[in-house]
Amino acid sequence: MMEHRPASANAIVRAAGGYGPPGGGYPPGGGYGGPPPGGGYGVPPAAPPPGGFGPPAPPGGGYGTPPPNAFGPPGFGPPAPPPGEDVNTTLPLVLSIVTMTCCLCVPMGVGGLIFALNANTAKKAGDLATAQSKAKTSIILSIIGMVGAVIIWTVYGVLMMINGRST
């Protein structure tokens, strides 16, 4: 005759001792009891070195120094600016606005304003050679506009004085 065993998993597990009290289960003495003598899953790992995990980073950073030219390999794109060099884009902008408004020489002022804005854009992009060239052109146009306005206003004043005296 066949032996009758309980069909439920609970009964089988209890019969095998898996979730029973300490001392039961498989292997005998295992089960849900306390950890074996000497620790649970082996010896604890060594403490991490002070300052974080892993070996210390190489001096100067983890990935090395950045390339000198952000636009691609060396020799591609505009040259890197020398350290400490800067382009003044405020003066050309102010001179061109003064030329347009106060001197009433609008064409030269508008040209100077366009070149000043282009110089500012080139400076933000890191192309200092182009920015310097555009700023210089803007200043030249603004000064020509101012000098032209002074000449025109002087000629106009002289003509008004001559015209006023002759009548």
Image (tube, grey):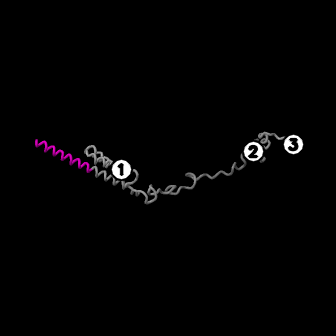
**Foreground pick, 24 / 150:** 150
Q: Which tag, 3 or 1, sits closer to the chain's start?
A: 3
Task: Say which of marks 3 and 1 sits in front.
Answer: 1
Q: Magenta stretch containing residue 138, yes or no?
A: no
Q: Is residue 145 magenta?
A: yes
Answer yes or no: is residue 130 visible: yes
Please tell me in which quadrant of the rendered image residue 166 appears: top left
Q: Quadrant of the N terminus?
A: top right
Q: Position of residue 150 (x, y in %)?
A: 22, 47
Q: Would residue 125 be found to the left or right of residue 160 on screen?
A: right
Residue 63 locus on image (x, y percent): 51, 56
Location of mark 3 (residue):
2
106, 123: nearer the viewer = 106
Mark 2: amino acid? Gly
Give the mark toward the camera: 3 or 2. Answer: 3
Q: Is label 2 or label 1 in front?
A: 1
- Label 1 sits on a secondary structure element that is helix
Which numbered circle lies on residue 118? Answer: 1
Earlier in the chain: of badge 2 and badge 1, it is 2
Q: Residue 145, position in %: x, y?
A: 26, 49
Question: Position of 31 compared to 164: left or right?
Answer: right
**Circle 3 crowding by C-alpha within 10 Å: few under 14, some 14–19, many from 20:** few
Relative to 94, 159 lies left or right: left
What SS does tag 3 mark?
loop
Report the amino acid beneath label 1.
Asn
Which residue is under mark 2? 31
In the image, which residues are magenta?
A: 143-167
Locate residue 152 relative to residue 42 in the image: left or right.
left
Report, in whole angstroms, how far the alpha carbon at label 2 lies from the one at label 1. 79 Å
> Residue 46 location, x and y as percent?
63, 53
